[in-house]
Image: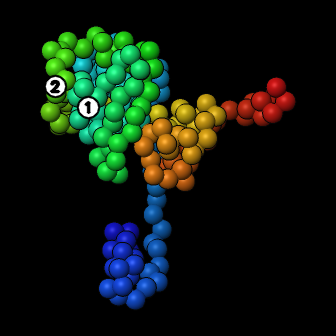
């Protein structure tokens, strides 16, 4: 795939002719998203900073790098919004802060200087040891930081929010990417009852 992407990019820049490269079959392993219940257990068994970080990523769809880059000046409690600098796509977006997230952020001990970071961790590596310790204390499945962002998209889709809106709210460029990557089939045959409800 990386080689194919390089060839296509070079062809788009007229550095070589377009080549047809046969794709090899790739087995995609379905990743497990976090759920709101998982987040609540995580928060109950972690320190306020780490619990708020987990909640923040799940309820805003922020990547770990984006969450760790949030400063207090980016948080507007009165409007219930936060400015997220999207590292991967190179733009900014404002995300809504649900009441439970406002409470989690308000419970973080901090000097609240505008230029201070909201979350005390300097990088994803400094948070990782504490992140992993919570799994055992809470009795929950070990999941990655990205599983929070994944959980955001999956939960929104399952609540009936269309992929275009989910992509906009979570900072994805493509609704198709949201749909194919984060859309998971639900294992409940009785869902057909909803058609006539």
> Looking at the picture, does residue 152 appear above or below residue 104?
below
> Marks 2 and 1: in contact by CB < 8 Å?
no
Give coordinates of residue 170: x percent, y percent: 45, 39
Give coordinates of residue 2: x percent, y percent: 33, 69
Given residues 131 and 113, the one toward you in this image is 113
Task: Give the image's coloring scheme.
Answer: rainbow
**Quadrant in which the N terminus appears:** bottom left
Q: Quadrant of residue 9?
A: bottom left
| Residue where numbered disc 1 is placed | 70
| Residue where numbered disc 2 is placed | 116
Secondary structure at numbered mark 1: loop
Residue 163 lies left or right of residue 137; in this view the side is right
Q: From this viewpoint, is residue 45 visible?
A: no
Secondary structure at numbered mark 2: loop
Mark 1 or 2, nearer chain start? 1
Give coordinates of residue 100: x percent, y percent: 42, 15
Q: Residues within 10 Å of mark 1 (few under 14, many from 20)?
A: some
Cα separation, mark 1 vs mark 2, equals 9 Å
Residue at the image position 24 percent from the left and 14 percent from the top = 108
Residue at the image position 57 percent from the left and 44 percent from the top = 163
Given residues 36 and 76, the one toward you in this image is 76
Give coordinates of residue 180: x percent, y percent: 54, 51
Q: From this viewpoint, is residue 78 visible?
A: yes
Residue at the image position 61 percent from the left and 30 percent from the top = 159
């Amino acid at each position: 795939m990386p080689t194919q992407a390089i060839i296509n990019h070079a062809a788009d820049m007229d550095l070589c002719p377009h080549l047809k490269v046969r794709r090899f079959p790739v087995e995609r392993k379905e990743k497990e998203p976090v759920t709101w219940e998982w987040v609540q257990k995580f928060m109950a068994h972690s320190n306020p900073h780490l619990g708020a970080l987990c909640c923040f990523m799940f309820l805003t769809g922020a990547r770990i790098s984006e969450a760790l880059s949030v400063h207090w000046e980016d948080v507007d409690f009165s409007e219930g919004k936060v400015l997220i600098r999207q590292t991967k796509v190179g733009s900014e977006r404002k995300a809504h802060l649900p009441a439970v997230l406002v409470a989690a952020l308000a419970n973080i001990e901090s000097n609240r200087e505008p230029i201070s970071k909201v979350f005390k961790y300097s990088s994803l590596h400094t948070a990782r040891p504490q992140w992993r310790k919570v799994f055992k204390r809470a009795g929950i499945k070990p999941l990655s930081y990205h599983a929070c962002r994944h959980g955001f998209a999956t939960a929104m889709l399952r609540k009936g929010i269309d992929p275009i809106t989910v992509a906009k709210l979570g900072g994805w460029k493509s609704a198709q990417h949201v749909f194919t990557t984060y859309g998971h089939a639900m294992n409940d045959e009785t869902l057909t009852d909803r058609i006539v409800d």
